[in-house]
Image (cartoon, rainbow, N blue to C red):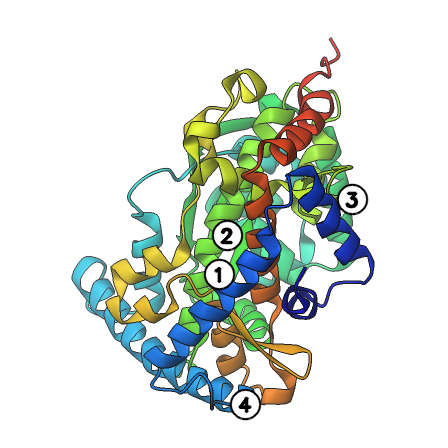
Amino acid sequence: MTRFLSEALQAPEPAFRLGLQNLERANGNPSNDIRLSSRIQRQTAQKLQALGLDPKDTTAEELYHVLAEKLKADDARLVKTLRTTAAKHISAEADVVAGMTHFLANLSDKTNCFALKATSLKSLIKKNPPKKTMKALGYRSLESFLKHEKPALILAASWLAENSSWHHQLLDSYKKLKASDFEDRKIAVIHADSKRWQALAHKTVDQKRHNLISFKEFGTIILLPLPSQIPAGVVTASLSLALHEINDIRACSSFLKICQVRPDFGNMVRTVVVDEPSLSSALLDQSVPWHLIHRYYGQIGERFREEIFGPHVRQEDMSWRAIEHDLINIEPSLEFWLDSSHLGLMHKHQPVSLNLVDAALNVCNNLPFEKRLTQAFKRSLWHELLLEYLNHDTVEQTVLRQLEPKLLAVPAKA
């Protein structure tokens, strides 16, 4: 086990070291941890060279600032491209959010999901009226509100305008949902572009530095209006996060499809909304995110086991998209960030992230080196490490054994 992984992940010791030792022994000591660490350090050095930096003579702080300038330049090109797309396909106004919406709504394939029906969502809203939201959007009656606004926008506005008590009540109502309340449909991407959304959107964009709201259970992404003067990095952050959300929606969709035979299906829906579903594994000594299992079978389709996942989940339900590949299709200059999501340079036991999302959020929040974000890098690195071991039959079989009794062999109540 290398010190790099432990420090980069800021993992608890000695638990992390012992866990890796268990994985190594179970698979004949393939040294996957050492191989991964060496590969990351080699690839990071190559990225530094691509930036015109000397890998042997570049400090972590120098790298951080060079990445920030690179991100700003790439973001400016991305904004220009999206405005051109909007002017060509939407309207002459060349709104950048319209360009983002057009791109996300027209991804080539595999963007279907298992999502809550609009009628079922409206029924939940009727039982838990969002009164503050209605007032903010100028509605006096719930009937008029439900009639004139899209269900997804009602849900989004309510999450912005209502208090935590309303949120908890809605989430608790999910426990009563059944598989029959869900349907297969394409992931929806909606641009909330009306003037009434300006006030609701302003606070969210100002605080989070992106304009994205996502509802995994409803299979919908909402893009809020952006100010006329868009801070550098915001568009890159928003579009990258939206592509991540598409992967997450697809992963949660496959999870719910498997869970649809369970009598506690509604609880599974609530779990998907409030937390990332996972499977426990004695071999790994910790839970494995379902998102990672979904990605594994999306990348290595020949390992998909029909007898385990069928009949409700097919191989095409497990598709996964590398966000950088999609971004390059819009703006080729973003190619530098390809395959960099799990790369980083260590500085005083703390990483400097080459992850695109981290870089964009660091820029648009104008964060100094000492307060830099690295969460996206750590998540990607952890997933990369687990994927190394999932490729071994011993670990894969251990995870699948957890899948069968917990998700499939539970008869639904009559």
Q: Quadrant of residue 109?
A: top left
Is residue 314 at all visible to an observer of this figure? Answer: yes
| Image height of 10 relative to 131, above or below | below
- Residue 322 position in % (x across, y down): 40, 52
Of tags 4 and 2, which is closer to the observer? 4
Q: Give the alpha-carbon distance from disc 4 to disc 3, as whole Å.
A: 36 Å
- Mark 2 and mark 3 lie on one chain; the one further toward the N terminus is 2
Question: What residue sits right under mark 1 in the picture?
Answer: 241
Identify residue type, mark 2.
Glu
Q: Quadrant of the C terminus?
A: top right
Question: What residue sits right under mark 2 in the picture?
Answer: 245
- Mark 4 and mark 3 lie on one chain; the one further toward the N terminus is 4
Which residue lies at the image location 58% right of the left edge and 86% below the top edge?
367
Q: Which mark is residue 61?
A: 4
Q: Is residue 405 left or right of residue 324?
A: right
Of tags 3 and 1, which is closer to the observer? 3
Q: Quadrant of residue 156?
A: bottom right
Q: Quadrant of the N terminus?
A: bottom right
Is residue 143 at all visible to an observer of this figure? Answer: no
Identify residue type, mark 1.
Leu
Q: Secondary structure at mark 3?
A: loop
Which residue lies at the image location 76% right of the left edge and 45% below the top edge?
286
